Image (tube, rainbow, N blue to C red):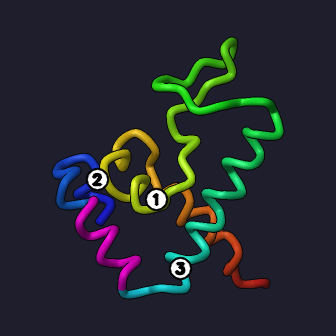
Amino acid sequence: MQKNRKENPEKFKQEFCKYLEEAPLLDFLSRLEHKRWCNSYYAMNFKYGEKKDENLKTHSCLIDDWDIIKGEKFEICHPEYDLLSVFTLFQKEE
């Protein structure tokens, strides 16, 4: 899947969304992680804006609708990062 990220972004998006469809728990946790991330930005007084701007405190990924994040805003918001954050919850202890 990672190879497709660079070589074929549309295929990556399709594979990523299929993966989450087949793993509803990971989809749910990724959705929650995105909400957590949004809330951390809201706490810093950011709001939605077409571009990320630290001075104006706007960010283009402050979107609550997970379907939009996985859909039309996929390339901008990178929902795979939300999934990666979820994977850190499942690290094996040594």
- Looking at the rendered structure, the number of numbered marks drawn on it comes to 3
Report whether 15 appears left or right of 32: left
Point out the tag, 2 or 1, that comes first from the N-terminus. Answer: 2
* Residue occupying the point 63% across, 62% down: 85
Q: Residues within 10 Å of mark 1 (few under 14, many from 20)?
A: some
Indicate the position of residue 93 as horizontal and vertical percent values: 78, 84
Q: Is residue 17 above or below residue 75?
A: below
Mark with earlier residue (3, 2): 2
The local crowd at label 3, few if under 14, some if 14 to 19, many if 20 or more residues have their Cα within 10 Å, is some
Q: Secondary structure at mark 2?
A: helix
Residue 26, numbered label: 3
Tell me if residue 17 is in the magenta stretch. Answer: yes
Q: What segment carries the magenta color?
A: 13-21
**Where, by quadrant of the figure, is residue 88 drawn?**
bottom right
Q: Which label lies toward us, 2 or 1?
A: 1
Query: Considering the image in quadrants, where does the C terminus appear?
Result: bottom right
Q: Which residue is mark 1?
A: 80
Q: CA distance from mark 1 to mark 3?
A: 11 Å
Q: Are marks 1 and 3 in contact (CB under 8 Å)?
A: no
Task: Please name the residue shown 50% across and 57% down the image.
Answer: 65
Instruction: Identify the secondary structure beneath mark 3.
Output: helix
> Is mark 2 in CB contact (under 8 Å) with mark 1?
yes
Assess whether residue 40 is covered by the magenta stretch.
Answer: no
- Label 2, on which residue? 5
How far apart marks 3 and 2 lie (CA) works out to 19 Å
Residue 55 vertical position relative to residue 40 in the rendered view, above or below = above
Residue found at x 62% / y 25%: 58
